Amino acid sequence: MTDDDLFTHQLPRAKEECTPHILAQYPQLEDVDTSMVNGENWEKWLNEQVKKFGEKLPLKPLISGFHKEKDPVEEAEEMMKGKGKVITVELKNETGNIDFSLN
């Protein structure tokens, strides 16, 4: 929906951006209750949802301006409240070798 390559730490923000648009397309999802889902019953719960709503629901992408693209490292630094708290590892593979450098 965002047409962005999101890193794991960016998913909660994307969820907040996308949820209203998903519910606008499928208002029946508004009443889906996940509060009781856990590591033991998730599969049963998921199967129940598939029976109700189907295996897949097509989604329209977000309208331009609803998703803010952010550099994943900069966003991690914002989340951690400082550059010194985020370690990046850059892999370079031009020659077939992998070089590690910490920034």
Image (cartoon, helix red, strand yellow):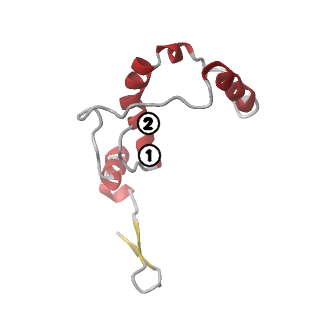
According to the picture, the residue beneath numbered tag 2 turns out to be 12
Q: Which mark is residue 9?
A: 1
Above or below residue 13? Residue 35 is above
Q: Quadrant of the C terminus?
A: bottom left
Q: Which mark is residue 49?
A: none
User: Can you give x and y, in whole percent of width and height, for residue 81 in the image?
Assistant: 32, 46
- How many other residues sit within 10 Å of disc 2, few (<14), some (14-19) or many (≥20)? few
Q: Nearer the viewer, residue 47 or 14?
A: 47
Residue drawn at x 42%, y 86% as measured from the top left: 95
Q: Looking at numbered disc 2 in the image, what kind of residue is underneath it?
A: Pro
- The residue at 39%/31% (across/down) is 60
Mark 1 touching mark 2, by CB under 8 A?
yes
Dot 2: element: helix
Looking at the image, residue 46 sits to the left or right of residue 12; the answer is right
Q: Quick one: which residue is furthest to the left in this view?
A: 65
Q: x, y percentage for residue 43?
A: 73, 32
Could you tell me the amino acid type at mark 1?
Answer: His
Please report the residue visible at 71 percent of the width from the left and 34 percent of the height from the top: 39
Using the image as rendered, state which of residue 55 and residue 38 is in the foreground: 55
Residue 88 visible, this angle: yes
